[in-house]
Image (cartoon, helix red, strand yellow):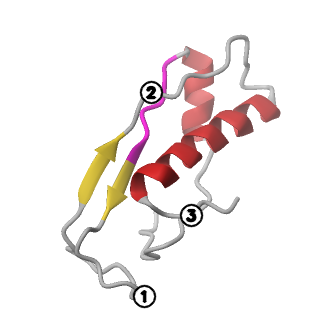
Amino acid sequence: AKMNRDPERMRKGQTGAARVSIATGAPLLPAGIRFPGHTPGTPIQDREPFEIEIGDPVFPDPGATIRDSEAVNALHRRMMEQISLLCGKRWDF
C-alpha cells in the first residue's frame, strides 16, 4: 500500500474489509489518523507526529451477502465516511 501524503483528501480504499465483515458478521472499527502539527498546503512528511481517533463500530446490514455488490459497496462507503470524519479529510468517491 502506498502512503497518502495528501493532507486534505483520502484515497478511494478497497472493499476487502467490507467483504470480510459481511461474510463473518464482525463489525468494522473505523480509525482516523490526524497530523495536528501539519503545515497546511504541504504534503504529509515521513515521521510527522500523528494522533489516531477510533470511532464507533460499523456493522454490516442484516442479510447482506458478499455476492451483493451493492451491499459490499454500501458498507465500504459507510466505513470510509466515518474514517473521513475521524481524520478530517474529504472522501470524494
Q: What stretch is highlighted in magenta?
A: 26-31
Along the polypeptide, which appears first: circle 1 or circle 2?
1
According to the picture, the residue beneath numbered tag 3 turns out to be 90
Q: Can you say whether 55 is above or below 88 in the image?
A: above
Q: Is 66 placed left or right of 88 in the picture?
A: right
According to the picture, the residue beneath numbered tag 2 turns out to be 57
* Crowd around label 3: few <14 · some 14–19 · many ≥20 (10 Å): some
Check disc 3 and give the amino acid type. Arg
Dot 2: element: loop
Farthest residue to the top: give it: 63
According to the picture, the residue beneath numbered tag 1 turns out to be 41
Which secondary structure type mostly characterizes the magenta part of the structure? loop
Q: In the image shown, does 38 or 46 lie closer to the viewer? A: 38
Along the polypeptide, which appears first: circle 3 or circle 1?
1
- Cα separation, mark 3 vs mark 1, equals 15 Å
Residue sitting at 81 percent across and 34 percent down? Answer: 70
Dot 1: element: loop
- Cα separation, mark 1 vs mark 2, equals 32 Å
Check disc 1 and give the amino acid type. Gly
Image location of residue 41, percent across then percent down = 42, 88
Tag 3 and tag 1, C-beta contact below 8 Å: no
Check disc 2 and give the amino acid type. Pro
* Crowd around label 2: few <14 · some 14–19 · many ≥20 (10 Å): some
Q: Is 3 placed left or right of 72 in the picture?
A: left
Image location of residue 7, percent across then percent down = 43, 74
Q: Can you say whether 3 is above or below 24 in the image?
A: below
Dot 3: element: loop
Tag 3 and tag 2, C-beta contact below 8 Å: no
Residue sitting at 41 percent across and 69 percent down? Answer: 3
